[in-house]
Image (cartoon, rainbow, N blue to C red):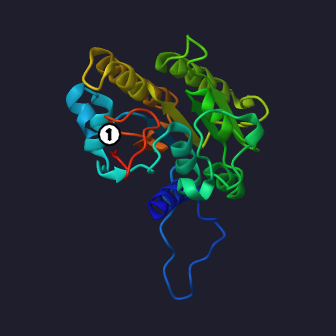
């Protein structure tokens, strides 16, 4: 699991780090072709979604991405699939026993994670901007203030917080960031990395059941939110230069934070 997460983080960083133009080819060898690195990366982080979810309710956007891109449905979550520890593993590339976040609520006294996250590496790679939209207050634990990084968090404590509302925040964010004046003090231009957290599938599945009407409605809402974010990037002429990742912190069936003997399969 440690190796898998580390590779995932390195891939994200590699997509955004360009080869310096001054880097010369070795003597006697032809110059390498121009870098194909993406200018932007979108990372959708779902919850309560696995291959079975596509049979429970139609998710055309996710199905299209899986069909047109590279996909696996046998990746594994960390053994503790609770939201906060699993998200910490995703962002640091470390298993729970290494990053040390074992709790699942925001606790101010515990501070921010000590291991570096993907946002630290993007900063070191030349100040790559990141915009992160979390849909749960527990994830304040990971919102460490950093240069070139901006966090926006909403969740159950705000009844108006929904995938649709999150999309409206992202639309406003991108429009302002594309204005030439940046977004506030943290983001000087369009973010190179956009992280979009959409946990409604798990919330509905845990509360109402994994084959219930509310779960199917939540899947549809999550899928529509993904489609809307992609449309925002298309409207701004960014989609052709954007790489899209979709993963899930948890699959179907288990209650939030339920102890498991192994990781559950997720996309």
**In the displayed image of the protein, which residue is found farthest to the top?**
160
**In the displayed image of the protein, which residue is found farthest to the bottom?**
28
Q: Which residue is mark 1?
A: 65
Crowding at dot 1, Cα within 10 Å, few <14 / some 14-19 / many 20+, comes out as: some
Q: Residue at x 46, y 29 (%)?
A: 199
The quarter of the image holding the N terminus is bottom left
Point out residue 58 in the picture as x, y percentages from the top left corner: 24, 25
Up/down of 126 relative to 264, above or below: below
Judge by depth and name the residue closer to the eye, 249 or 9: 249
Q: Residue at x 41, y 49 (%)?
A: 77
Q: Quadrant of residue 175?
A: top right
Give the left or right position of residue 8, taking residue 101 as reference: left
Up/down of 192 relative to 204, above or below: below
Point out residue 146 in the picture as x, y percentages from the top left corner: 75, 44
The quarter of the image holding the C terminus is top left
Judge by depth and name the residue closer to the eye, 247 or 2: 2
Q: Look at the numbered disc 1 and give the secondary structure of its residue.
A: helix
Number of numbered discs visible in the structure rendering: 1
Q: Residue at x 22, y 27 (%)?
A: 56
Point out residue 12 in the picture as x, y percentages from the top left corner: 52, 53
**In the displayed image of the protein, which residue is found farthest to the left?**
55
Up/down of 236 relative to 45, above or below: above
Judge by depth and name the residue closer to the eye, 21 or 17: 17
Q: Residue at x 35, y 52 (%)?
A: 75
Point out residue 254 in the picture as x, y percentages from the top left corner: 36, 36
């Amino acid at each position: 699991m440690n190796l898998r997460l580390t590779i995932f983080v390195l891939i994200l960083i590699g997509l955004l780090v360009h080869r310096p133009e001054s880097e010369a080819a070795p003597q006697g060898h032809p110059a390498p072709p121009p870098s194909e690195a993406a200018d932007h990366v979108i990372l959708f982080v779902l919850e309560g979604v696995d291959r079975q979810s596509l049979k429970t309710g139609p998710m055309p956007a996710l199905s299209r991405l899986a069909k047109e891109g590279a996909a696996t449905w046998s990746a594994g979550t960390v053994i503790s699939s609770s939201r906060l520890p699993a998200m910490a593993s995703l962002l640091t590339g470390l298993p729970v026993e290494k990053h040390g976040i074992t709790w699942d609520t925001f606790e101010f006294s515990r501070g921010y994670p000590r291991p570096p996250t993907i946002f630290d590496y993007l900063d070191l790679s030349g100040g790559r901007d990141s915009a992160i939209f979390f849909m749960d207050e527990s994830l304040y634990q990971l919102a460490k203030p950093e240069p070139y990084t901006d966090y926006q968090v909403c969740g159950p404590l705000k009844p108006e917080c929904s995938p649709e509302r999150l999309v409206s925040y992202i639309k406003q964010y991108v429009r302002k960031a594309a204005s030439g004046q940046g977004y506030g003090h943290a983001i000087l231009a369009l973010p190179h990395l956009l992280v979009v957290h959409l946990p409604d599938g798990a919330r509905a599945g845990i509360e109402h059941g994994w084959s219930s009407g509310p779960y199917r409605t939540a899947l549809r809402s999550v899928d529509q939110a993904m489609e809307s974010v992609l449309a925002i990037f298309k409207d701004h002429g960014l989609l052709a230069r954007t790489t899209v990742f979709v993963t899930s912190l948890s699959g179907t069936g288990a209650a939030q934070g339920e102890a498991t003997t192994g990781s559950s399969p997720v996309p």
